[in-house]
Image: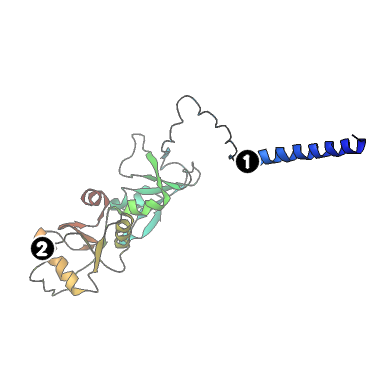
Amino acid sequence: MSMRARASIGWMGAVLGLLGLTLASACEDERPPAPPPVADAPEGPQAAPPTQAESFFDPGGGPAVLTYAGDRGSFADASAVDAVPEEARGLVRVTVLDGDPPPPGSVWVTNLRAPEPDGRFRLRTVARDMFEELALGEGRSSAVELPQGLQPPEQVAAVDGVVVYKTAWCGVCKKVEAYLKRKGVDYEAKDIEKDPRAAAELQAKASAQGVRTGSVPVIDVGGQLIVGFDRARLEKLL
């Protein structure tokens, strides 16, 4: 065999070998890449969730701003404990101008009716967007007078759900409605200033239960009347 023939046969063998390798690779099953190794979970107890922050307010110390729930659901500021109305002292926001700041997203609050033995007030934190609801939910209401000469309905229908008797200007009423919406409670709102029938209905219900009607909101929960935004009682009834 000539050298040219032997070279040709050798070249063809190399080509066939490469083709065989290519076909073998193409016939293999495709597999996804192996996932990276997962690190073992750390041994030992996990970190405990952070506890609620706590501090103290000293009325005789540095300057502070005391924010409290005022008339008609508005909020007002005072610089001294004595300037906060007694009925609003149950939950007051305290901003100590040169004191420790609260954790992010929260505010310092205290009960000005419960000083410590040394005269200071213990502070705790609540969420910033919950302060107004909690402060007004201490039973706050807005004074109102029912119109004269109301004719009570012959029969007051029993209430299965929730009815809020309110006025358009009452900030406490607005907070009650926001609270009910946040909890997903279906309710009916009735403006006793714009709707004489609603005012007469409220008067009839209040007279039957011996409840005074000099303020709003008045909330009817399944036939039980609640005067003011009594959040603790609502939590039990809803």
Q: What residue type is labelled 1?
A: Cys
> Residue 198: x and y, percent?
19, 70
Q: In which quarter of the image is residue 12?
A: top right
Location of residue 145 with respect to 228 vertically, above or below? below
Residue at horizontal 57%, vertical 32%?
Answer: 37
The furthest residue to the top: 44
Q: Mark 1 points at which residue?
A: 27
Local SS, label 2: helix
Tag 1: Cα neighbours inside 10 Å, few (<14), some, or many (≥20)?
A: few
Location of residue 231 with respect to 151 vertically, above or below? above
Q: How far apart are marks 2 and 1 (CA)?
A: 90 Å
The furthest residue to the front: 1
Mark 2 in CB contact with mark 1 (< 8 angstroms): no
Q: Which of the two residues, 192 or 120, is positioned nearer the viewer here?
A: 192
Q: Which of the two residues, 132 or 29, is positioned nearer the viewer here?
A: 29
Q: Which amino acid does label 2 sit on?
A: Ser
Does residue 66 appear left or right of residue 205 in this picture? right
Location of residue 44 with respect to 69 vertically, above or below? above
Does residue 204 appear left or right of residue 186 in this picture? left
The label shown at residue 118 is none
Residue at horizontal 70%, vertical 40%?
Answer: 22
The quarter in which the N terminus is drawn is top right
Badge 2 or badge 1: first in the primary sequence = 1
Q: Name the residue under label 2.
A: 207
Local SS, label 1: helix
Tell which tag, 2 or 1, sits nearer the viewer: 1
> Residue 119: x and y, percent?
36, 38
Q: Which of the two residues, 157 or 100, is positioned nearer the viewer here?
A: 157
